[in-house]
Amino acid sequence: MNLLQRIERWGDNHHPKWVDGLRILLGLFLMWKGIQFVDNIDLLKSRIAEQPFLTAVSFWLAHYIVFAHTVGGLFIALGLLTRVGVIANLPVLIGAVFFINSSTNLFSVYPEMSLSVVVLLGLLFFLVEGSGRVSVDEYMRTHPEKSAA
């Protein structure tokens, strides 16, 4: 049994139900941020272009961020391929913490940095923890005859 299988098995065996509520809230928050980014795509592209090494790819990166947040957030909220949704969002949040929000203080009046850190920690938690019992993945695992149709 490799390391990923052991992590998944541990996460499935040690998963309280209230954690599913946190997973759903995290997914809905990411979807909400993705919708906000769609509304302000030009501001997002200009914010990305402030980094000298990202200027050329700011258009593509902005669209990846929107896609990762909306679709990945939906996957996380539903508990459908949760780890895939988390992995899609990890580079975005790592970039937000270390590159975009690095000029602000962690405990500033505008909590962008601290919120990015909390969401990043939540993503890392659900990367290990997985979908949980209240999820589409669990339903498909326990009802294979219905999910195959």
Image: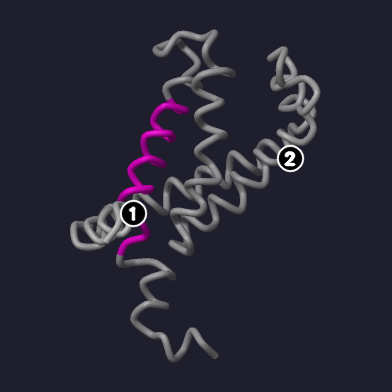
The mark closer to the camera, 2 or 1, is 1
Quarter of the image with the N terminus is bottom left
Q: What is the x, y in percent for residue 96?
A: 55, 25
Q: Is residue 96 above or below residue 70?
A: above
> Is residue 68 in the magenta section?
no
Quarter of the image with the C terminus is bottom right
Crowding at dot 2, Cα within 10 Å, few <14 / some 14-19 / many 20+, comes out as some
Q: Residue furthest front?
A: 1
> Reading the chain from its start, which is encountered first: label 2 or label 1?
1
* Disc 1 residue type (three-letter): Leu
Q: Main secondary structure of the magenta part?
A: helix
Residue shown at 43%/35% (left/top)?
A: 119
Residue shown at 75%/19% (left/top)?
A: 49
Residue bounds of the magenta highlight: 115-132
- Marks 2 and 1, how far apart in space? 30 Å
Crowding at dot 1, Cα within 10 Å, few <14 / some 14-19 / many 20+, comes out as few
Q: What is the x, y in percent for residue 89?
A: 53, 42
Q: Is residue 106 above or below residue 33?
A: above
Q: What is the x, y in percent for residue 4?
A: 33, 54
Residue shown at 57%/34% (left/top)?
A: 92
Horizontal arrangement in the rendering, residue 44 relative to residue 114 (left or right): right
Q: How is the image coloured?
A: one colour
**What label does residue 68 carry, if any?**
none
Horizontal arrangement in the rendering, residue 9 relative to residue 113 (left or right): left
Task: Name the element at disc 1.
Answer: helix
**What label does residue 4 carry, if any?**
1
User: Which residue is identified by label 2?
Assistant: 63
- Depth order, front residue of 81/23: 81
* Disc 2 residue type (three-letter): His
